[in-house]
Amino acid sequence: MAQVVIVGAGPTGATMALLLIKRGIKVKLIEASRDFKRLFRGEGLMPSGLDALEQMGLLELVADIPHQSFAAWEFILSGRTLFKVSEPIEPGGKPCTTVSQPHLLAAIVQQAEKYSEFEFIQGEAVKDILSSNQRVSGVRLGSGREITADLVIAADGRNSLLRKQAGLNLTQLQSNIDILWFKLDSGSLLQSENIFYSILHERDGFGLFRASEGQLHIGWGLHSDDDFDWRKIDWAEKLAAASPPWLAEHILNNRDTLTQPLLLSVIVGRCDRWSIPGLLLLGDAVHPMSPIRAQGINMAFRDVIVAANHLVPLLIQAEINLSQIDSVLLQIQQEREPEIIRIQKLQAQEMAQAEMLHKSALLRWGARTFTPIIRPGIRASWLKRQKQLRQGVTPVHLAV
Ligand SMILES: Cc1cc2nc3c(=O)[nH]c(=O)nc-3n(C[C@H](O)[C@H](O)[C@H](O)COP(=O)(O)OP(=O)(O)OC[C@H]3O[C@@H](n4cnc5c(N)ncnc54)[C@H](O)[C@@H]3O)c2cc1C
């Protein structure tokens, strides 16, 4: 029976661990943080991510943890609705839903802990990978403890240490924004109808929604050509100035509850190689995703399903054949890479649309002045672009 070590208990590592342990494979899951309450964890799930959770038998968990479905997407330009689209977009489909990531991760690990062959090492970071016979053979923790494995899976996120130690180069794709993240008391705002708002005013733009635990979450796009220092801004005033009147009033009335801005640097990229013998990278560790249209967790779940399909038949064998394991690592990359390339391209296209409006006062004027005329065309073109971002590009079916 094989021993697998998974580094990182984010969406990739936690689900990978559960799929393997449920199929009788020994797993040690190592997580640097002491708990799952990180300052920020993305939580929007598209239908493709919800479908992946369903395939993994985890969708029913969502019912018991904080979550909120979206009722619509609405784009507002200088206080006027450019267009609005109701959820679910696909008739009879699943609506995009925010799910509390700390609760989801805790519930997944709790399920894994029911299996005696599972070990969760929490609050300890991996510091080194171990090698023997030109193959990764385990990891060393900060405490010096060494853990050997037939396969190490790096699910340690966009700043992956294991990626660097393995010498796998991340080619970064252009990303023109960073995100400032705020939370704000919601009162009853968006309670009965949770709309994801994309709000653009002059050169400023932000997204706002009611998150899984009821607070309003705000992601402000920070551009390299901004003419202000974000650390010195009265953010309640700045957000209110860019908002339609009903929202400006709410922000100013609740300004005491507006959190300090949290700077989230956006890294987007891909590795040319997803593995070396004995080590496989999955999720953000190998293809950090832009936050545009909530793709990262969804892609991570789909990586995990494909990896399980290839790995489980080899890992459950009584005699473990290490070179067979290494050869399927390449197949996992081949199967997943086309979707990741396409989704990152679509995210870049979405970003380019926002950038055009950010940069061109003429375009903003035209869009604002001729809104009723251009609305149907813009709405139809947006809808067309969303299909793959919502449903994925390649078929992904859990077969083990
Ligand atoms: C502003 C922003 C908003 C986003 N919003 C969304 C969204 O709404 N929906 C969506 O789908 N995606 C979103 N994303 C992307 C999403 O957060 C990531 O794609 C997703 O979290 C990737 O999951 P992961 O498990 O691969 O990595 P991570 O979630 O980063 O998890 C990696 C884990 O590894 C641990 N770790 C790191 N190093 C070590 C080590 N050396 N030893 C042990 N443990 C280690 C970390 O503590 C962490 O828990 C957003 C991203 C950003 C920047």
Image: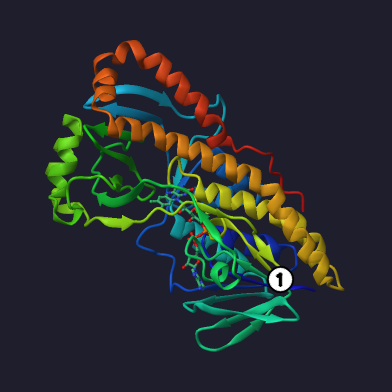
Mark 1, residues whose alpha carbon is within 10 Å: few (<14), some, or many (≥20)? many
Q: Residue furthest top?
A: 373
Q: Residue furthest right?
A: 319
Task: Establish if 23 lies above or below 372.
Answer: below
Left or right: 232 as drawn, with respect to 206: left
Q: At 64% across and 48% down in the image, what residue appears?
A: 337
Way the structure is coloured: rainbow
Residue 330 appears in which quarter of the rendering? Answer: bottom right
Q: How many marks?
A: 1
State whether residue 193 appears in this view: no
Q: At 33% across and 28% down in the image, what residue appears?
A: 75
Residue 317 appears in which quarter of the rendering? Answer: bottom right
The x and y percentages for residue 260 are 21, 57
- The quadrant in which the N terminus is found is bottom right
Q: At 28% across and 13% down in the image, what residue appears?
A: 370
State whether residue 27 appears in this view: yes
Q: Residue furthest bottom?
A: 144
Residue on which disc 1 sits? 278
Task: Establish if 322 lies above or below 205.
Answer: below
Dot 1 amino acid type = Gly
Task: Establish if 115 lies above or below 396.
Answer: below
The x and y percentages for residue 143 are 51, 88
Q: At 51% across and 28% down in the image, what residue appears?
A: 385
The x and y percentages for residue 299 are 57, 48
Q: Secondary structure at mark 1?
A: loop
The x and y percentages for residue 45 are 49, 44
Left or right: 203 as drawn, with respect to 264: left
